Image (cartoon, rainbow, N blue to C red):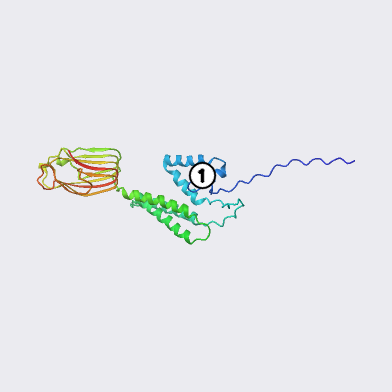
Amino acid sequence: MTAAPPPAPPTDPPPVARPALRRSRTDKVVGGVAGGLAEYSGIDALLWRVGFVALTVAGGSGVLVYLLLWLLVPAGPRRPVDGAPAAPPGPRSPVAGITVAGLLIAVGLLVLVTRYTDVDLGPRGFLATALLVVGAGLVASSFARGRAPRGGLIAVGAVLSLAVLFTSAVPEIDDGELGDRTYRPDSIADVRSVYRLDAGNLDVDLSEIDVDEIDTPLRVRIYHGLGDVEVTVPDDVDVRIDHVENGIGDVDLFDEGSDGGLFRGEDGDGRVDLVLTIDHGLGDVEVSRA
């Protein structure tokens, strides 16, 4: 009687292949990025979404990271209604990667130009250039073969468009001042021709000036970015408001609306004493009498 052969030594199970990172088509709120990260890492999608929100609140990087993942990570395969395995997706278009690369190159070139030359493009120049690159990517995606991530490009373009509109509504200011400012000159000589402030509430109180000392119209221009503007003038001064440009907010001129023009004082002689011009970005503007 022959002995039974010894049992084969146990073999380790083959390693489980990690699935490729794909955006989820079923667990999605916007682009399926958090759902895809959850399927790839095993961490609940809610935690990924909370992380993106936290990064956004902390410094705004959460939106950028999410949009880049939306652009660069392909979507998962579609699953038919009957539950059968979906056909593998077709080849992915390289438009997204090329657009992101072009965006980084363009921004890097603008940084070099701003750093080593006298050209100051400002935030509008950077945002407008980025918007042009993304727009070119969208045009290219409409002609490219393969699956082009138009949704991600459209989302990036929408964010950049809103940023361009916001920066266009806020006037460019050179002084770079921040914080609340109050100016209360007590003579004509102390009145500035220009008052500037980037961010903060601006209070220009001209109620103490003597109108009888004004020989020629006193011209005052205000450049303000973010915050409220309040201008106070004497009761007997005749004020002409040539121009009020306000991006977002309410404008109240002597409780008579928001249109400029000539506003006569109580004891004024009808001759223009003060000419106001206001360029304002975000906040409320009020011009009133003492």
Q: Is residue 267 left or right of residue 244?
A: left
Relative image position of residue 176 (x, y in whole percent): 30, 43
Most distant residue in the front direction: 82
Quarter of the picture containing the N terminus is top right
Residue pictured at 42% horizontal, 53% vertical? 157
Relative image position of residue 17 (x, y in whole percent): 63, 46
Query: Which element type, helix, strand or loop, lies under badge 1?
Result: helix
Kindly identify the amino acid type of the residue bearing the numbered disc 1.
Answer: Ala
Please say whether residue 48 is visible from this viewpoint.
yes
Residue pictured at 42% horizontal, 40% vertical? 57
Most distant residue in the bottom direction: 143
Q: Is residue 279 left or right of residue 136?
A: left
Relative image position of residue 47 (x, y in whole percent): 51, 39
Q: Is residue 166 left or right of residue 206?
A: right
Q: Which residue is mark 1?
A: 34
Q: Quadrant of residue 58?
A: top left
Most distant residue in the right direction: 1
Q: Is residue 187 above or below residue 76?
A: above
Residue pictured at 51% horizontal, 51% vertical? 72
Q: Residues within 10 Å of mark 1 (few under 14, many from 20)?
A: many
Quarter of the picture containing the C terminus is top left
Relative image position of residue 191 (x, y in whole percent): 18, 42
Q: Is residue 131 above or below residue 50?
A: below
Q: Quadrant of residue 206?
A: top left
